[in-house]
């Protein structure tokens, strides 16, 4: 029998609550010293209480970029392969949440507990790096919103990968990057059953995130990458 992966066996007690207090500052340095990141409308992130930050996903640095651009400490759901890398111990100390993308139940359960504690959780609902246009959104973000009642703040990350760059591309130092926060999406699911509430949440979050990415493109003038048919996006 195959042993459970790290992402499948993670528990809430495994997550260092103090981790984001230092790692967000490292992220800020990466954002504003190593790169040249413009953060738009950070005031849309509630100053207290549970918050779900739901972002599009195009580039390999989106996680740390988002972490450093937030005005509050956050625990971001990150694929477990980063925890298995040489810098995996830093991911653990940073208080981030490993997820097995084949079975994300454990990571979502951990994220739910952190939200119930009034914390900020970041998630990439597309599930993997792609064009970042939100044409496909996984149900995990809706489940978290329904389970906790936390508002969902859409985030659009632009510039971390441009047309012609491979998906593993790391932007050059001082590259101009953008993180744009939208107004919170507050869901009213009190009078609906679990299935109806999930369907309502999925529709509202998917539409809200897609509209926000389009707004962010218009605001910044930076478009999403277009992957060529020659495999540049792999």
Image: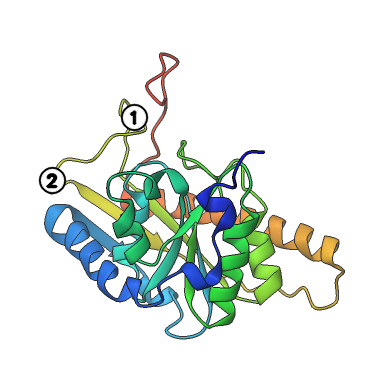
State which tag comes first along the sequence, 2 or 1.
1
Q: Position of residue 141 (x, y in %)?
A: 61, 59
Q: Position of residue 5 (x, y in %)?
A: 54, 47
Q: Position of residue 120 (x, y in %)?
A: 47, 73
Q: Is residue 34 visible?
A: yes
Determine which residue is flagged by label 2.
Answer: 173
- Residue at image position (20%, 49%) is 176
Q: Position of residue 96 (x, y in %)?
A: 41, 62
Q: Is residue 74 left or right of residue 9?
A: left
Residue 160 in which image quadrant: top left
User: Which element type, helix, strand or loop, lies under badge 2?
Assistant: loop
- Residue at image position (85%, 77%) is 191
Q: Nearer the viewer, residue 47 or 127?
A: 127
Q: Is residue 158 left or right of residue 177?
A: right
CA gap between label 2 and label 1 equals 18 Å
Mark 2 neighbour density, 10 Å: few (under 14) some (14–19) many (20 or more): few
Q: Quadrant of the C terminus?
A: top left
Mark 1 neighbour density, 10 Å: few (under 14) some (14–19) many (20 or more): some
Q: Is residue 163 left or right of residue 215?
A: left
Q: Quadrant of the N terminus?
A: top right
Determine which residue is flagged by label 1.
Answer: 163
Q: Is residue 92 above or below residue 62?
A: below
User: Which element type, helix, strand or loop, lies under badge 1?
Assistant: loop
């Amino acid at each position: 029998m195959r042993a459970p992966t790290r992402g499948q066996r993670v528990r809430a007690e495994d997550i260092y609550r103090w981790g984001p207090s230092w790692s967000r500052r490292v992220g800020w340095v990466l954002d504003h010293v190593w790169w040249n990141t413009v953060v738009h409308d950070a005031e849309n992130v509630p100053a207290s209480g549970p918050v779900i930050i739901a972002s599009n996903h195009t580039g390999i640095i989106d996680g740390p970029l988002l972490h450093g651009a937030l005005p509050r400490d956050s625990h971001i759901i990150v694929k477990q392969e980063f925890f298995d890398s040489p810098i995996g111990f830093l991911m653990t100390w940073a208080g981030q949440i490993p997820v097995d993308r084949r079975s994300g139940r454990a990571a979502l359960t951990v994220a739910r507990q952190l939200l119930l504690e009034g914390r900020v959780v970041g998630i990439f609902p597309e599930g993997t790096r792609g064009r970042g246009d939100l044409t496909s959104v996984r149900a995990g973000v809706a489940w978290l919103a329904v389970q906790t009642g936390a508002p969902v703040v859409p985030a659009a990350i632009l510039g971390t990968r441009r047309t012609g760059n491979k998906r593993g591309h790391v932007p050059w130092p001082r590259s101009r990057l953008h993180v744009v926060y939208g107004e919170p999406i507050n869901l009213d699911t009190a009078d609906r059953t679990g299935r109806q509430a999930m369907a309502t949440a999925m529709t509202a979050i998917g539409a809200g995130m897609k509209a926000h990415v389009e707004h962010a493109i218009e605001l910044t003038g930076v478009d999403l990458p277009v992957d060529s048919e020659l495999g540049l996006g792999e």
